[in-house]
Image: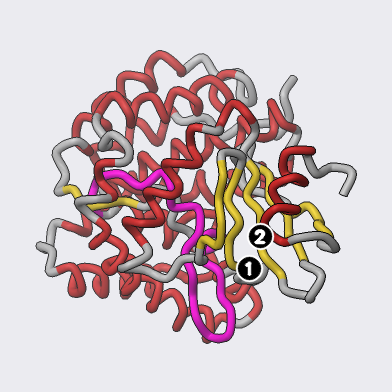
């Protein structure tokens, strides 16, 4: 309890009464903090604590919950105030962990996650109003982190300026895709499995964007493609196309979106290691580099981008 901020302690006292106990949980790549809290009767809940600089995001999360919860399973909000949100505890087992330990069961859950993604997209239009839609400038801004923390600081590459021109072409093309509501971080670690059901978390940044954005995240983030395999990836792309009623060009859009997302996420991993010493994120970079190569094979327009993209990171800042 020594790591629990005083204002969080006061919030829990008001909400749960005396006799509760809290344990910190390892959070995501944000600076929010999470605690599992057990009350005096043994009931477990999760506290998402927002530091002072992020307090304005509590209301955004509440509004995102109101938009998403009628259409997709998310942890129930039990109570909230200006410092954070008290939510239903859906356990620690993620879809990513399931597919690593039990591939057949995991594949079935991944199929359900594809179907759930289509349901999640019904959160529009209310959810679409929470955050500005993706556009070329937003895509480029995401990729700047990759240029700074991966290309320049980890790889010491001299190709940064050349890559910037290719990044701009990619982002201009993405802006022309068909748009749907996007979770923005829809991957196996943000989908929890409990009692045979799946729940979505970390959805507060939802916005309109390319129709394959979340699918690319689900099928490729965190190196899961090595577990799923190309055949399953193709199956799930086809399943999504059928559920969405999309045209055949969705496959090309998928790999184009996947390329941008992969480059962006490499920057996220590199920044976590460089600025916050979360070095476990670096383990995800090698499979991400393989994904860039795959995208260039599928969409030859980006072969030069893939050739210039550095692969010589020492996995530590020098």
Quarter of the image holding residue 33?
A: top right
Q: Secondary structure at mark 2?
A: strand
Quarter of the image holding residue 269?
A: top right
Residue 293 versus residue 11: which sits nearer the camera? 11
Q: State which region is magenta.
A: 188-211
Residue 217 locus on image (x, y percent): 42, 54
Residue 100 locus on image (x, y percent): 62, 72
**Cα–Cα gap, marks 1 and 2:** 5 Å
261 over 118 or under it: above or below: above
Residue 171 versus residue 184: which sits nearer the camera? 184
Identify the residue shown where x is 22% and y is 38%: 174
Query: Which numbered disc covers residue 46?
Result: 2
Q: How many marks?
A: 2
Q: Does the image show residue 292?
A: no
Identify the residue shown where x is 36% and y is 56%: 66
188 over 98 or under it: above or below: above
191 relative position to 15: left or right: left
> Per the image, is 192 magenta?
yes
Residue labelled with disc 1: 89
Say few, some or many: other residues with alpha carbon within 10 Å of mark 2 (under 14 / 14 to 19 / 20 or more): many
274 relative position to 61: left or right: right
The disc, 1 or 2, on the residue closer to the chain's N-terminal end is: 2
Q: Are marks 1 and 2 in contact (CB under 8 Å)?
A: yes
Say few, some or many: other residues with alpha carbon within 10 Å of mark 1 (under 14 / 14 to 19 / 20 or more): some
Q: Secondary structure at mark 1?
A: loop
């Amino acid at each position: 309890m020594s790591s629990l901020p005083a204002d969080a302690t006061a919030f829990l006292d008001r909400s749960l009464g005396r006799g509760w106990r809290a344990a910190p949980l390892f959070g995501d790549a944000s600076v929010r903090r999470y605690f599992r809290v057990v009350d005096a009767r043994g009931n477990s809940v999760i506290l998402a604590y927002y530091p002072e600089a992020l307090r304005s995001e509590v209301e955004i999360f509440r509004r995102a919950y109101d938009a998403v919860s009628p259409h997709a399973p998310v942890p129930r909000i039990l109570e909230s105030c200006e410092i954070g949100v008290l939510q239903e505890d859906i356990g620690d087992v993620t879809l990513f962990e399931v597919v690593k330990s039990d591939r057949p069961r995991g594949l079935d859950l991944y199929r359900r996650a594809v179907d759930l993604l289509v349901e999640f997209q019904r959160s529009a239009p209310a959810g679409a109003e929470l955050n500005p839609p993706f556009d070329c400038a937003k895509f480029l801004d995401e990729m700047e982190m990759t240029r700074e923390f991966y290309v320049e600081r980890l790889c010491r590459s001299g190709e940064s300026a050349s890559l910037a021109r290719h990044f701009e072409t990619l982002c201009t093309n993405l802006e022309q895709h068909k748009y749907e509501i996007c979770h923005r971080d829809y991957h196996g670690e943000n989908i929890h499995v409990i009692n045979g059901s799946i729940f979505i978390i970390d959805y507060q940044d939802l916005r309109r964007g390319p129709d394959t954005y979340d699918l690319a995240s689900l099928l490729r983030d965190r190196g899961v493609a090595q577990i799923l395999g190309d055949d399953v990836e193709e199956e799930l792309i086809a399943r999504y196309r059928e559920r969405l009623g999309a045209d055949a060009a969705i496959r090309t859009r998928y790999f184009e979106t996947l390329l941008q997302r992969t480059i962006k996420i490499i920057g996220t991993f590199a920044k976590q290691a460089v600025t916050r010493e979360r070095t476990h994120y670096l383990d995800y970079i090698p499979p991400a580099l393989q994904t860039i190569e795959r995208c260039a094979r599928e969409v030859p327009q980006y072969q030069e981008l893939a050739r210039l993209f550095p692969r010589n990171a020492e996995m530590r800042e020098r």
